[in-house]
Each structure stands twice: as C-alpha cells, then as structure tokens.
Image (tube, grey):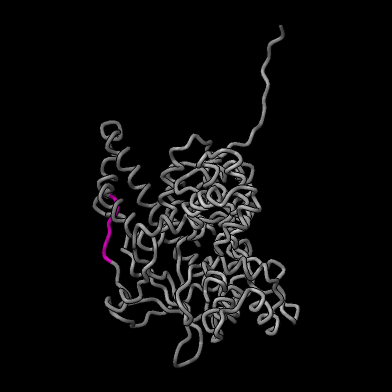
Amino acid sequence: MQQGLSLSLKQQLKLSQNLIQRLEMLSLSYEELEEAIRKEEESNPFLEVKAGYYSADSTYFSADSSLDYMRSDEEDEKSSWMERAISVKESLYDHLRMQIETLDLSDGEKSAALIIASALDSKGFLEKDLDEILPQSLRPYGEKALKAVQSLDPSGVGARDYKESLKIQLRELKLQKIDEEHISYMIDNLDLIKGGKTDLIAKKLNIDEEEAGLLIDILKSLTPYPGEKYSTEFDSYIHPDIAIKKNASTGLLEITDFGNNLPDVTISPEYAELENGMTEDRKKNREALKFLKENRKRAEDIISTIELRTTNLHKIALYLIEKQRSFFDNGPNYLKPDQQQNMASYLNLSASTVSRLCAKKYIETDWGTYPVSFFFSSTKNLLNDDGQEMSKNAVKARIKEIIGSYEGKKAPSDQKISDMLAAEGIKIARRTVAKYRAELSIDSSYDRT
C-alpha cells in the first residue's frame, strides 16, 4: 500500500466571538443597544458609561452637506424626546436568535440563519430573496438555514406569505394525509372560509358538512401572521435613530441625529493605567493581564461598533434623501423602487452588514415614522402610464389610502381598487391588489361592508 501526503483546499467560515458580538450589536434597536451597553458596563471594568444628552444638543446637518460637516443646535428637552417615542411590538429577532444558538448547525448555516431571522418583517415573513440578503460566502447555506428558521417557534415564521405560513403550521400538526390535503385546499381558497360557505367546501372536497366544519375549526386555530402572534405578548417603545424633515423656515430638508441620546461610552483611564503598569512584570501578572486585555478588547469593539453604526446611519440618511427626495417632499405615494443591495454598493459595505444596519432602525419624517426597510421594495414590474417603475410600498400606501378614504356605501372591491389605480396611471392586476391588501392585514370588501 502506497502512503503519502496530499494537500487540499476548502472554504470554511470562521467568525471570532468578538466579530459575532459586533455583528449582533449592529442589528440592535436603539433601546436594545442602550440595554446592551448597560449590561456590558456591569461586567467590564474598562467600559466607562455616562448618560446621554437626551436631545438637548441634538446634531443637525444639511442634507446637501458632507458627513464631515455637522453643526450643533438647541432642540427640545428630555420630555419632548420622550414624546417622540412610538409604541411598537417587540421584534422576533431576539426570540429566534436564542433558538438558533441551540440548533445543531455549522458556523455558516448558523450565521445565515441569524441574517434570515433579522430580515423577517413584523409578521414573521421573509419577503426578500435569499441571494438579496445573504453575502455570497453564505449563499450555499441559505436553503438549509431557511428551513432551520422555519422550524422555530412561533410556528410558521420564515414563510414567504401567510398561505405558506399556514401550510408550515399545518404540517406540524401531523394530521392524516387526507385531512392535511383538504385543509391545504381551504388555505388556497380562503374566500370560501370567510364567506362561511361550508356546503360548497363540503361539495368541493366530497365530504359531509359536519366534517368540513371540523376541518375549518382546525384551520381557524392556525395563525396567519406568526410574527404578530408573538409580538402581542410584549409592549416596548422605540425611538427614531434619525429624522429627515423640512425646516419650517427655509423649506430645506434637514437631518437630525438622535445619537447623543445614547450613553457616552469611553475607555476607563484608570483601568488603562492599571494595565500599563502591570505590563512591567508580565509573568507575575499573566492572569490579570489576560483578563484586562480581553475586557479592553470588548470595550474597544463596542465603541467602534457604535461609531460604525452612527456614521453609517448618517450615510443611509444621505442616500435616502438622494434616492427618495420625492417621498420626503410629497409623501408615501411617491416612494421609488429600490433595493438594499444598491445602498450596500453606495456605502461600500457588504449586503449582510447593511441588512443588520437597517434592522430595527427608524426614521422620523414629516409623513410619520418608518422603519428603514420601508424605503426598499422591488418593483414587481409595476409601471405607471409614463413607463416609470413604482415602489411596491408606494402602491400599498395608495391602496390603504383608497380603502380608508372611500365614502361609498359599499366598500370598494379589489377590482374597483384596480380600476381606480388604473385611472391614476398605475397599472396593477386585481390579484395583485388582493395580495397587497392581505399584506396590509385589510379584510376583503365582503368583510369590510
């Protein structure tokens, strides 16, 4: 038998604990970041934390200025800053992250699963393609990571829409195959359920009405929006990270940075001096120096992550003003189609880093406060009469506006809404109207009348 040595190359993803910590901190909301800083302060002597300024000295700079130019200005006191808080439901991300950490996955699969979890919307759905949110190095792990996320609690998360979510929940009930097929048919024909047409369902499935009623009860026990099911358990408050609003005097757009509200984080000079003093006798102070070095590194990583977060949120604001000026001037109906990948190229950052930066970050505007993700949606071949592409979110905003302001005796049907949009130069099929209406959690015209 011939023996010998051979060399082979293989790609392997290894993330250090410090890098994982930094990536996770980028995806934290305003309140979660403050909590993480306070928690680290309790165990890390190198971290020196002072209270933030609560907008007494908020930072303003012109939308046309560079990031190097900022000017301070007097703003409202702490009470006004607190009034800016908006009540929202707690995100799914932390709940899912704890479960992902316990799964038997490779490093690459786990990293991909965490990115997927951070990309879910408030309903628990994944609206974006895996290639859009995952960096190229993690794309081979995408499908397995997605299946892992879809196996987590609450049941049905990670689906593309409410029908897929219901079918995921249905499979987990482990019913008899024929019952699962019958309920799956009902999921694809939910209008029959809403209309209470038990006899028609029984006829379609060739079963009696009593059995059809029992299957309907099983279906009604499922949750169409699993993210909302989880989020209703807790109320929390979020604060916008930045504001982009028109100056009442000049009429120009201004960017306000609320970063000063965060605690001021620095390296403790006392412990830095202590570490320097111990280096004179490294052998004697080996264990103490190891402890100090590790904690100093953690503290420096937290400070640099906060700086990265702040700097890139400024750049995101400038990008949005450049690409979405019509929105800031005229409102949600004028939102233009865009994708986060475009902004990633603009910021010279990876798609996964931008995804984390955008997660759970909010922007206050003259038209309301929106998550950063609101400004990004695909076109789905939506065109107006001028041949210009339209944002999916802009069309959804217009549909919501039509339904909310309609004054007729009978609620407008999906076809009626499609016709009204066509009259405005927006060509969109009835089925697409129905899909967007469902995504907005608005019932059909039958249930609204």
In front: 175, or 283?
175
Left or right: where 242 falls relative to 187? left
Residue drawn at x 48%, y 60% as measured from the top left: 122
The magenta segment is 46-51
Instruction: Point out the residue furthest to the bottom here.
Output: 249
Left or right: where 15 falls relative to 303? right
Left or right: where 60 falls relative to 380? left
Q: Does residue 351 lie above or below 2 as drawn?
A: below
* In magenta stretch: residue 49: yes
**Numbered circles on residues, count:** 0
Residue drawn at x 65%, y 66% as measured from the top left: 378
Residue 200 falls in image quadrant: bottom right
Q: Is residue 406 visible?
A: yes
Residue 348 lies, in percent from the top left, at 59, 61
Q: Does residue 71 lie above or below 116 as drawn?
A: below
In front: 440, or 271?
440
Q: Does residue 240 lie above or below 419 as drawn?
A: above
Residue 263 falls in image quadrant: bottom left
